[in-house]
Image (cartoon, grey):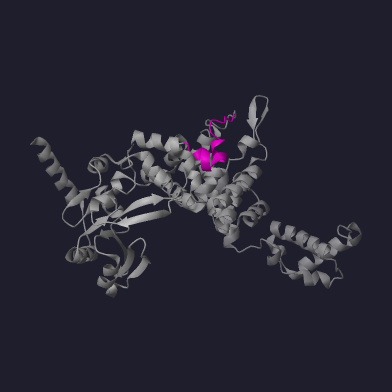
Amino acid sequence: MFNKYFYFKSMVIIMDKIFLTKDISHILDILNFYGRGYIIGGYIRDTLLGIHPKDCDFCTDISYKRLLSIFSGYSSVSVGKSFGVIKIHLNGLTYDIAKMRRDVSFTSNRRETGIEFVDNIMEDLQRRDFTINSIAYDGRNFVYGSKLCEEDINGKTVRFIGLPSDRIKEDPLRMLRGIRLFTEKNLKNFDYDSLNAIKINANLINNISMERIREEFVKILLSDRPKLGIIYLLKCNLLQEFLPELYDCYNFEQHNPNHHKDVFGHSLLVLENTKKDIILRLAALFHDIGKPNTFSMENGVGHFYGHNIISTELTHKILSRLNFSKYIIDAVSKLVYDHMSMINVSTKSSAKKIINRVGIENIENLYFLSRADILGSFPPYNFDRIDAALNLIRGIIFANEPLSVKDLKISGKDIINLGITDGILIGEILKICLAEVLENPDKNNKEILIHIAKCNMHNNKISEKNL
């Protein structure tokens, strides 16, 4: 009697948390008029966890063909007859409606080789990945795919539904997805058996496409707890599989008075101190990834000469392997290469060189990376030099001062008119003019620059015989 009362009481508490918009209720009413309809997945999970849900998906026992007919006035789009899924549009939002199904078999990368449509919501729920995702709601009552669903929602626990190894072998990406849910949804517990199953089956992640791995990895990095996410990737043996270069930083001591953490721990502190920007967070995670390859010891102190160069090369390799866009690869690589440069910016010339290398669009991120790098080192923290550098750079950008050869008031044509025809010499003269202008923007005047060019021609600093 006590158990029944407790169960009823907890159901009331959960039901009080569910809020359905007018449109969601409308779709659910239509499904329940023609058959049985349920809200499933993330909408229910997030609502019960106290998180504002983004998308709302439905499942039903109504046939695929009948669904298309019923929702013909809702700009319905066929996602795939073989999966029994349609998309409908209502008041500017998109909703997925799927025919209930169970999986029959899989290939190693989660391309189902067979599914069967069913009319039983329990069969549909039990094919899902985690208990907190295995909940359906028909507008009045909840249906649970496992007796642990409610317990895991209340306990904010990640747990595979059914046998963890079976769920992983059906789709190895679920290992990453579990860690992503744990970090992204601010969950508190990770079921021991589920964690252990991930450790045992970690090598199966190699059966998954890099695009799918990248998608989950990005979500982990953009969560509120990216540091915890990377730690769990390490604990579950996944880091070793798809990011071995970062794993090499684990327990690699720096033997340097400026650092109180190993390379891995320092990188996680830097990551933790950055804002939610994928370019910045990738740069934070990988900025020192080349240190194990550049370590040397002098008088009992560890040094990593040129580690920014090796880190840049490894970053480019990793991001290319994960099929990131060329834009992201380029931006992150530039930040990694110059992650130590801002502290040395003290003149307009040095500031402009940084702007040219990194790009105006990346300057703010370079500052935030530099700041996070300081916070990840041994205290006390001093930001005076990078603050001054940022102010100097901002002043240059705001004043629209010349930064490159294309900003000069003369061109190669003007040098040709002086009698120089060799392309290499023309380029050298323009570089000399640019160097003068970077130091003194007032010299960016055509007459002054022509004079500088002539002087360098006549005093033999540049001559054709030097070719």
**Residue at the outermost bottom position:** 73
Residue at 74% x, 57% y is 435
Residue at 56% x, 46% y is 386
Residue 243, position as x, y percentages in the image: 53, 42
Judging depth in this view, the residue of 178 and 380 nearest the camera is 178
Residue 348 lies in quadrant: bottom right
Residue 139, position as x, y percentages in the image: 18, 57
Q: Is residue 154 visible?
A: yes
Residue 246 counted in the magenta span: yes
Q: Is residue 359 above or below residue 309?
A: below
Residue 236 lies in quadrant: top left
Q: 2 left or right of 173?
A: left
**Residue at the outermost left position:** 1
Residue 200 counted in the magenta span: no
Q: Which residues are magenta?
A: 237-254
**Residue at the outermost top position:** 300
Residue at 28% x, 52% y is 124
Q: How many marks?
A: 0
Residue 232, position as x, y percentages in the image: 43, 38
Residue at 28% x, 55% y is 43
Q: Is residue 221 above or below residue 247?
A: below
Q: 51 left or right of 284?
A: left
Q: 252 left or right of 172?
A: right
Q: Quadrant of the N terminus?
A: top left
Q: Is residue 383 visible?
A: no
Residue 326, position as x, y percentages in the image: 58, 58
Q: 382 left or right of 300?
A: left
Judging depth in this view, the residue of 43 and 73 nearest the camera is 73
Q: Quadrant of the C terminus?
A: bottom right
